[in-house]
Image (cartoon, rainbow, N blue to C red):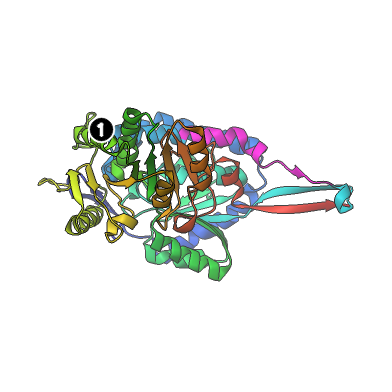
C-alpha cells in the first residue's frame, strides 16, 4: 500500500510520500536507543510537564488536526475534533497519575527474610508502535502517553493512509519539550516492520490492527522473545433483554454501530435481542438507522461519512452480499450509492445464520446484524459464538441478569446499559482472537515495564 493521503470522500490522491530508506530508519532507531539512556532517569514531574505541554498543543491545534484526520480517513469532522480533545485529556490523566501508578509496591519483608522488600517498575526501552488509521490520533496517544511517562521511548509505524497525522505526532512531543528521539515517526511500509522489530535495540512492540497483522508481529516478537501487546479485531455483542429501556437501547445502539463510520474495533456489530422484544426493538433501531445522514464528513450535519479505503468498502459489500445470497434480509441500506468516494450506507441485516460470513467475521463498516435469542442462556451463547472477545454491551434492568452478563460474556470489557468506550481510567484490551495485554489505566502503563523484585537484607 502506497504511503499517501487519499481523500476517501472523493478518491482523490492529495499527497504521496516516499518510505524512509534503511539508512534513515537505522538512524532513528539509534537516536531512540541513545535517547533512552538519559530519558529513563528524568523525573515523573519533568515528564509530566512535557506531557501537559503536548496536551496544550493539541488543544490549541485541535481544529487543524481534526481536519487532517478527516481528510485522510473520512470520519465526521465533529468526531475528529472530539478525538483530539480525548487525547489531550488522556495526556493530562497520565501526567497527573504516573508517579502513583508506578510507585514502589511494598512486600512482606518478614515473610521473605529481608529488612525491606518491594517491587519496582522500570521502563523497558525502545517500544515499536504499529498503529491503525481508524482513530489515527487516539490509538497512538493511548500508547504514547503512558509509555513516555513510564520512561520508555517510542517509534511509530502508522498506517500508510494517514501519513500527515503520523508526521504531526512525530513532531508533537519534541515541540512540547521532550528530548529529541523520545518519540519518532517511521514512514515505512509493512514489509519494513520485521527488520525494525528484530533490531536488538528495540525492546518491545505494541500493535493495534487486523488479526493477520497481529499474528505477524507476535510471531516475529516471539522468535526474538520480546514483549508485545496486541489489540486486534472485535465483533462486539449488543444484547437487549425484555426489561431494557428499548428506546434508549436503540438510540445508543445506533451510535455504538456507526461511530467512526462503523470502523471501530469496539463498535457494536451483533445485536442480539430477546424474542419477547425483538420486533419492537428492531423497528425502533431500523427507524433510527434510516434517519442517519450520510455525506461529506466536513459537513456538520453528517452522521456517517465514507469508509476510509476502497478496499474496506468492497469488503463490506462482499459480506452483505454473501449474507443476502444465503437468505439474509436487508432491512435498510445494503447498496453503495452512485457517487464519488467510498461510501456505504447505514445498513441493518436480519435472518443471519452460522453459514454466512457475516455471522462470524468482523464487519468494519456501518452494518448491524440482528439476532433473535430465546432467553438469556441463548443470548449469552450467541454473544460468545465468535472468535473475538474485545467488548460486549448488555441492556437489562434485572440485577441478576446484569451479574450473569458480567460473569459470562467472554470479552475484555462488559458495559451494562451503556456503550463500550475506552477511558483512561479503565483497562482496555481483549481475549481470544482480539489480542492480549492491556492499554490505559494503571494496567496499561505497567505493560512496558520491568517489574523488578527488590530484596534488601
Q: Please tell me whether residue 254 belongs to the stretch shown in magenta.
A: no
Would you say 442 lies left or right of 359 here?
A: right
Could you tell me which secondary element the residue under label 1 belongs to?
helix
Q: Is residue 456 shown above or below 138?
A: below
Q: Main secondary structure of the magenta part?
A: helix
Number of marks drawn:
1
Q: Nearer the viewer, residue 328 or 362?
A: 328
Q: Residue at x 61, y 35 (%)?
A: 97
Task: Choose top left, top right, bottom left or bottom right for residue 223.
Answer: bottom right
Q: Nearer the viewer, residue 368 or 259?
A: 368
Q: Is residue 418 shown above or below 387?
A: above
Q: Residue at x 79, y 52 (%)?
A: 454
Q: Nearer the viewer, residue 244 or 308?
A: 244
Picture coordinates of residue 357 (x, y %)? Answer: 28, 59
Picture coordinates of residue 185 (x, y %)? Answer: 43, 52
Query: Which residue sits furthest bottom?
Result: 223
Picture coordinates of residue 188 (x, y %)? Answer: 38, 60
Q: Please tell me whether residue 96 belongs to the stretch shown in magenta.
A: yes
Q: Which residue is mark 1?
A: 284
Looking at the figure, which quarter contains the N terminus?
bottom left
Task: Choose top left, top right, bottom left or bottom right for residue 276.
Answer: top left
Number of residues whose C-alpha sits closer than 10 Å to that of mark 1, classed few (under 14), some (14–19) or many (20 or more)? some
Q: Please report the bounds of the magenta region as a residue range.
A: 88-108
Would you say 439 lies left or right of 76 here?
A: right
Could one spot residue 365 in this view of the protein? yes
Would you say 64 lies left or right of 44 here?
A: left
Could one spot residue 167 in this view of the protein? no
Picture coordinates of residue 175 (x, y %)? Answer: 48, 39
Amino acid at each position: 500500500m502506497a504511503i499517501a493521503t487519499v481523500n476517501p470522500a472523493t478518491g482523490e490522491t492529495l499527497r504521496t510520500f516516499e518510505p524512509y530508506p534503511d539508512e534513515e530508519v537505522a538512524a532513528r532507531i539509534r537516536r531512540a536507543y541513545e535517547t533512552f539512556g538519559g530519558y529513563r532517569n528524568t523525573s515523573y514531574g519533568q515528564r509530566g510537564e512535557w506531557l501537559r505541554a503536548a496536551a496544550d498543543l493539541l488543544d490549541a491545534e485541535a481544529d487543524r488536526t481534526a481536519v487532517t484526520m478527516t481528510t485522510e480517513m473520512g470520519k465526521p469532522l465533529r468526531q475528529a475534533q472530539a478525538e483530539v480533545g480525548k487525547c489531550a485529556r488522556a495526556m493530562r490523566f497520565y501526567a497527573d497519575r504516573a508517579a502513583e501508578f508506578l510507585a514502589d509496591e511494598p512486600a512482606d519483608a518478614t515473610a521473605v527474610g529481608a529488612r525491606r522488600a518491594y517491587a519496582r517498575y522500570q521502563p523497558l526501552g525502545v517500544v515499536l508502535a504499529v498503529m491503525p488509521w481508524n482513530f489515527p490520533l487516539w490509538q497512538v496517544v493511548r500508547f504514547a502517553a503512558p509509555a513516555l511517562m513510564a520512561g520508555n521511548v517510542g517509534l511509530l509505524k502508522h498506517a500508510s493512509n494517514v501519513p500527515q497525522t503520523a508526521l504531526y505526532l512525530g513532531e508533537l512531543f519534541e515541540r512540547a519539550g521532550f528530548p529529541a528521539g523520545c518519540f519518532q515517526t517511521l514512514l515505512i511500509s509493512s514489509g519494513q516492520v520485521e527488520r525494525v522489530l528484530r533490531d536488538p535495540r528495540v525492546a518491545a512492540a505494541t500493535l493495534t490492527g487486523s488479526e493477520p497483522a497481529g499474528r505477524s508481529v507476535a510471531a516475529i516478537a516471539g522468535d526474538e522473545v520480546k514483549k508485545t501487546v496486541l489489540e486486534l479485531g472485535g465483533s462486539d455483542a449488543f444484547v437487549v433483554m425484555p426489561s431494557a429501556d428499548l428506546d434508549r437501547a436503540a438510540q445508543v445502539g445506533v451510535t455504538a454501530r456507526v461511530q467512526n463510520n462503523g470502523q471501530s474495533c469496539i463498535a457494536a456489530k451483533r445485536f442480539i435481542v430477546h424474542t419477547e422484544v425483538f420486533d419492537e426493538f428492531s423497528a425502533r433501531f431500523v427507524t433510527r438507522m434510516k434517519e442517519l445522514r450520510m455525506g461529506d464528513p466536513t459537513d456538520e450535519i453528517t452522521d456517517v461519512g465514507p469508509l476510509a479505503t476502497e478496499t474496506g468498502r468492497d469488503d463490506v459489500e462482499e459480506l452483505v452480499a454473501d449474507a443476502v445470497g444465503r437468505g439474509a434480509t436487508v432491512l435498510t441500506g445494503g447498496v453503495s450509492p452512485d457517487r464519488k468516494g467510498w461510501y456505504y450506507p447505514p445498513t441493518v441485516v436480519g435472518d443471519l445464520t452460522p453459514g454466512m460470513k457475516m455471522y462470524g467475521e468482523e464487519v468494519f463498516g456501518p452494518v448491524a446484524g440482528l439476532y433473535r435469542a430465546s432467553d438469556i442462556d441463548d443470548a449469552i451463547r450467541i454473544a460468545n459464538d465468535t472468535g473475538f472477545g474485545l467488548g460486549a454491551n448488555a441492556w437489562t434492568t434485572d440485577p441478576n441478569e446484569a451479574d450473569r452478563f458480567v460473569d459470562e460474556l467472554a470479552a475484555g470489557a462488559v458495559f451494562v446499559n451503556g456503550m463500550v468506550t475506552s477511558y483512561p481510567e479503565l483497562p482496555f484490551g481483549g481475549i481470544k482472537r482480539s489480542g492480549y495485554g492491556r492499554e490505559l489505566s494503571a494496567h496499561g502503563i505497567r505493560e512496558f515495564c520491568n517489574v523488578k523484585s527488590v530484596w534488601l537484607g
